[in-house]
Amino acid sequence: MRKNKLKQLLKTNNTVMCGWLHIPNTWTAEVMANAGWDGVTVDMQHGLHSIETAIQMMQAISTTETVPIARSNWNTPGEIMRLLDGGAYGIICPMINTKEECESFVGACRYPPLGYRSFGPTRARVYGGLDYAEHANDEILTLAMVETVKAVENIKGICETKGLDGIFIGSGDLKLSIKATEKENVDELFDQAVNTILKECQQNNLFAGVWCATIEDAKKMVDKGFKFIALKSDSMMLTQYAKEQTNTLKNILKN
């Protein structure tokens, strides 16, 4: 089976750089995959993809050395298994709040006896190799998203889930969850939650990941010890660069 480069990087204590795909298009997926990311995530939760476009985008990604990942829409076994059968080499699962939910997620990603994933690696065997089924349990990356106050309270049990590779913090939702109960000191409480999650990951030999909106935030998280950094999204980068270019041109035309 094709080795999962992301797992190899993480095992050697390197930091993974991950691109993020919201635009449902094979060309933008191919462009992002050729940009130098270690992996790129097809975001089924907040991206505009269908399962068909997601698989087509993973086909485009697979023309490069970049590893295809998918964020499932929810902790739904059927969708998770379809994304894996379509060639995703890792799953990021949103809104994991308890150990039981995490066990359900990880189980959907692992063949028996480690889980309950149904056998049928339709495209995965083409991308990964004919011996995919024999090695998939070792190569597929599982990341549980912690993005609520409840999840932080249950982080110890979540991190003890057998077969889990790492925790991925949903920064935006975690801040919203904190703000729902605490009107003040949200940033301070968010930093405390991040430190709690990171500490628990380190104690359980899991890697910690986080989505970042800026390079400055990414540097801060790397300095803290995060090993999986997702930065912006394709649509955010396109929007930002387009605005910069049009504003620059407007200023030239004014002079």
Image: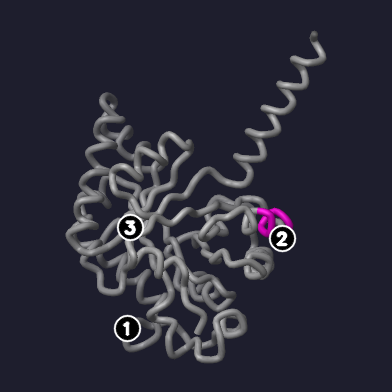
**Mark 3 element type:** strand
- Identify the disc placed on residue 177: none
Using the numbered discs, state the Cα–Cα distance from disc 3 to disc 1 in whole angstroms.
Answer: 19 Å
Q: Mark 2 highlights which residue?
A: 26
Mark 2 lies on a secondary structure that is: helix
- Residue ID for mark 1: 114
Which image quarter holds the C terminus? top right
The image position of residue 44, as x and y in percent, is: 56, 58
Instruction: Report the magenta residues as a range.
Output: 27-31
Of the image marks 2 and 1, the number of the one nearer the N terminus: 2
What residue appears at the point 20 percent right and 50 percent down from the top-left corner?
153
Count of numbered circles on the image: 3
Percent position of residue 31, x then y: 68, 54
Circle 3 crowding by C-alpha within 10 Å: few under 14, some 14–19, many from 20: many
Relative vertical location of residue 207 with respect to residue 237 in this rendering, above or below: below
Residue 167's disc is 3
Judge from the rendering whether residue 50 lies leftward or rightward of residue 212; answer left or right.
right
Question: At 63% across and 66% down in the image, what residue appears?
Answer: 64
* Residue 39: x %, y % from top left: 52, 60
Colour style of the rendered protein structure: one colour
| C-alpha span from label 2 to label 1 | 34 Å
Q: Are dots 3 and 1 in contact, CB under 8 Å?
A: no
Query: Residue 66 location, x and y as percent?
Result: 57, 64
- Give the residue type at disc 3: Ile
Give the vertical position of 177 relative to 19 (above or below).
above
Amino acid residing under circle 2: Thr
**Among numbered discs 3 and 2, the one appearing first in the sequence:** 2
